[in-house]
Amino acid sequence: MSTEIVNRVANSKLVTFDLEDYYPPGERVLFDIKDWLLEGLVLREGVFREKAAQHDWSRYKDAYVALTCTTDAIIPAWAYMLLATYLQPYAKKTVSGNLDDLETVLYTEIIQDMDVSGLVDKPVIVKGCSHKPVPKNAYLLLIEKLQPVVKSLLYGEACSSVPLYKKPKK
């Protein structure tokens, strides 16, 4: 007697949501200003402005740039703002921080603009294990966006998911 194998996952109403699908393409650049500081620690305004004016900013065309200083120097806000004015015509996005901060900012904007109306009262599984650098904060932001509208939230793969939330019955 042969028994037909039924793929219950394929037949379910479960919607898989993969944050990796929303990863914005483009080069990521970590711009460390420590080399523009005296002994890597002291920002001298005149020298800093001169280096900024002479730098080839066009190399950051269509890139996502994270401005940082990897030494213990105290960098005034205007220094990052000055660099941002040079990057503005070229870079897609400029942030202060590391590359994870950059990805968090990008995903924050993407998730805020996301239309989730098609997920109302549906069971949703948020896929894990991405190959692209999806920051952990993106998953938390996604929960804030999805929980008010979905029927349930799970994490992982359909065959081995972790339940996160189930809408209370009225």
Image (cartoon, rainbow, N blue to C red):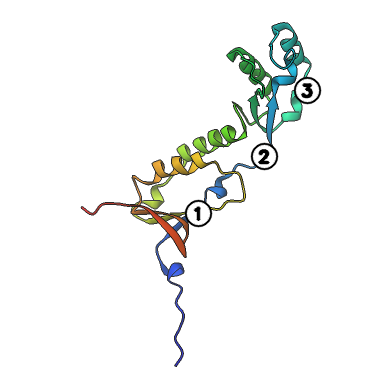
Instruction: Identify the mark nearer the N-term, 3 or 2.
Output: 2
Q: Amino acid at mark 2?
A: Gly
> From mark 3 to mark 2, how far is it between C-alphas?
19 Å
Q: If the image is split into quadrants, where does the N terminus sit? A: bottom left
Q: Amino acid at mark 3?
A: Asp
> 116 or 55: which is nearer to us?
55
Number of other residues with Cα within 10 Å of mark 3, as a class: few under 14, some 14 to 19, many 20 or more:
few
Residue 127, disc? 1
Q: In the rendered view, would you say 111 is above or below 71?
A: below
Label 3: which secondary element = loop
Q: Residue at x 66, y 22 (%)?
A: 69
User: Where does the image place residue 70, in percent across and percent down from the top left?
Assistant: 66, 24
Q: Is residue 124 left or right of residue 88?
A: left
Q: Amino acid at mark 1?
A: Lys
Give the foreground label among 2 and 1: 1
Label 1: which secondary element = loop
Label 2: which secondary element = loop
Q: Residue at x 42, y 71 (%)?
A: 8
Q: Residue at x 59, y 33 (%)?
A: 102
Residue 17, disc? none
User: Where does the image place residue 109, in percent across and percent down from the top left?
Assistant: 51, 35
Can residue 90 be seen here? The reply is: no
Give the foreground label among 3 and 1: 1
Q: Which residue is mark 2?
A: 26
User: Where does the image place residue 24, in percent across and percent down from the top left?
Assistant: 60, 41
> From mark 2 to mark 1, how far is it between C-alphas?
22 Å
